[in-house]
Image (tube, rainbow, N blue to C red):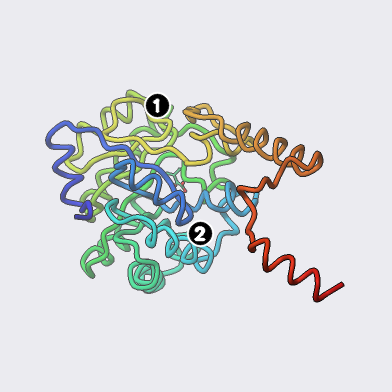
Amino acid sequence: MRVTINDLRDMKANGEKIPMITAYDYTSARIVDAAGVPVILVGDTLGQVVLGYDSTLPVTIDEMLHHTKAVARGAERALIIGDMPFMTYQTSTEDAMRNAGRFLQEGGAQAVKLEGGVHVAATVRRMVESGIPVMGHIGLTPQSVHQLGGYRVQGKSLKSAVRLMEDARALEEAGVFSLVLECVPASLAKLITERLSIPTIGIGAGAGCDGQVQVFHDMLGLFSDFVPRHAKRYATLGEAIADAVAAYMGEVRDGSFPTRKHSYHISDDVLAELEAQVR
Ligand code: KIV
């Protein structure tokens, strides 16, 4: 049975930590799902780690839907959350509802995520009232990178910490089922987590959150253009792939690949007949 937003709430209540991972295609979703990860985020980090953009800003809803559908085909059990890209919910509540609806109807996601605090709370409320589960995202919100003046830790001053607490409360009040805290001091994230009844999911927000999220390509060592401090490498697949490709090229060049095992065959009789006919 698929994980639900109620299961996540129960996990927080039971003190069970929530591991969330991003995925962007069928194969990675199958692997992550089979490993038992309860929540998969089809993040708009897609823009950087899959599509090669220099930020999340150019990502379109059509690109997100294309990849969300692939993930939905691969993940049978995990809750799938589609990340709403820049300018698909900031323009109006109507746009937000229409675009979020596309993630559920066309993409096969069970929920959406969007960035922002107090100023998106009214939109979130309408979405939730319409039956769309919404995950919030505050702290470093990469779609606002130019407004924030860069990819910086948020909530370090008293004023900005108070604002984040207000954002968190406004989103909980509006009905988000969970909240991502990105690049927030660990003690502030812990305090927010303690004050909310919904689960918080941290990335660069310390161990006091109810769960953690990591970007698939970062944690597996597949993306090295930029490695944030909060990304932990659990594997070095980029190096493993480079080694495998080098071995393949070497075997093609020296003729040791393909072997008989990797080839298809006809019987010697048919071959002899063929050679006689085409002589
Ligand atoms: O797009 C994404 O992958 C995200 C996570 C980093 C939280 O928003």
Would residue 92 be found to the left or right of residue 188 on screen? right
Q: Position of residue 131 (x, y in %)?
A: 22, 67
Callout 1 secondary element: loop
SS at mark 2 in the image: loop
> Label 2 CB, ligand 1: below 8 Å?
no
Q: Quadrant of residue 57?
A: bottom right
Residue that appears at 32% across and 37% down: 19
User: Image point 16% across, 31% down: which residue?
Assistant: 15
Please tell me which residue lies in front, 242 or 138: 242
Residue 185, which numbered label? 1
Give whichever of 118, 47 is nearer the camera: 47
Residue 156 placement: quadrant: top left
In-image side of 43 versus 190 (left or right): right
* Real-space Cα separation, disc 1 to disc 2, in angstroms: 25 Å
- Check disc 1 and give the amino acid type: Pro
Q: Residues within 10 Å of mark 1 (few under 14, many from 20)?
A: some
Query: Where residue 144 sits: x, y (%)?
Result: 52, 49
> For mark 2, what is the residue?
86
- The single residue placed furthest to the right in the displayed view is 279
**Residue kind at label 2, given as amino acid type:** Phe
